[in-house]
Amino acid sequence: MSQLVAESPNKARIQQLAEKLAGLQAGLEDEKIQRIDTIEQRLSSLDDRMKAAAAHDDKKYRAMREAVAKVSESWRTSARPERHLRRAKSRSSRSLTADYSLLLKLKFKHEKMQRAVF
């Protein structure tokens, strides 16, 4: 019986410490949940602000993108005929240069042959 009495204060102390530990664990869990909720709220707020900023930027720059697209398209459509014309001119000028060069060679040979005959 004396042993039960001696163990009783220890058991009571252990029980008291166990309750205190359980309370601390519950408090820590509550703090953890509160921190997670706070972080989730901040992230949600940040996400909302980012979406709003993206929508604002989209509106702000849509007109500029459309204008650039129109200019780019008009440049592409007007540049094609000019490129083809330049290429055709280049080809024809090369052809004319080659023809003129051949004509000069033939003329030179003809003159040379005439000098040799006379």
Image (tube, rainbow, N blue to C red):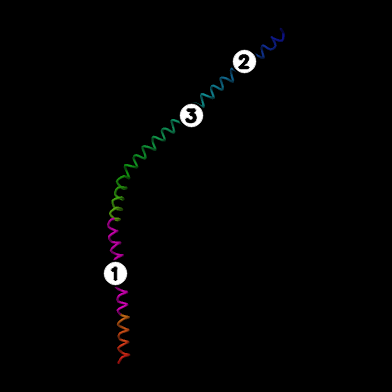
Mark 1–mark 2 distance (CA, rounded to whole Å): 106 Å
Q: Which residue lies furthest to the bottom in this view?
A: 118
The crowding category of the residue bearing disc 3, from other C-alpha atoms within 10 Å (few below 14, some 14 to 19, many at least 20), is few
Name the residue nearer the viewer: 103 or 41. Answer: 103
Image point (39%, 34%), residue name: 48
User: Where does the image place residue 5, in percent across and percent down from the top left?
Assistant: 69, 9
Instruction: Please determine whether, in this image, residue 94 is positioned above or below residue 20.
Output: below
**Quarter-wise, where is residue 41 in the image?**
top left
In the rendered structure, find residue 92 and report the number of the disc placed on it: 1
At numbered mark 3, what does the secondary structure look like: helix, strand or loop? helix
Instruction: Please determine whether, in this image, residue 44 is positioned above or below residue 97.
Output: above
Image point (31%, 81%), residue name: 106
Q: Residue furthest right?
A: 2
Q: What stretch is highlighted in magenta?
A: 77-103
Task: Answer whether labels 1 and 2 touch (C-beta < 8 Å).
Answer: no
Query: Badge 2 is on which residue?
Result: 15
Among the two numbered marks 3 and 1 on one chain, the one whose residue lies closer to the N terminus: 3
Query: Badge 3 is on which residue?
Result: 36
Image point (28%, 54%), residue name: 74
**Quarter-wise, where is residue 88 in the image?**
bottom left
At numbered mark 1, what does the secondary structure look like: helix, strand or loop? helix
User: Where does the image place residue 29, in percent across and percent down from the top left?
Assistant: 53, 24
User: What is the three-letter code of the residue carrying label 1?
Assistant: Ser
Q: Is the magenta stretch mostly helix, strand or loop?
A: helix
User: What is the three-letter code of the residue carrying label 2?
Assistant: Gln
Residue 82 forms part of the magenta stretch: yes
The N terminus - image quarter: top right
Image point (28%, 61%), residue name: 82
Mark 3–mark 2 distance (CA, rounded to whole Å): 31 Å
Of the residues tagged 1 and 2, which is closer to the observer?
A: 1
Name the residue nearer the viewer: 37 or 9. Answer: 37
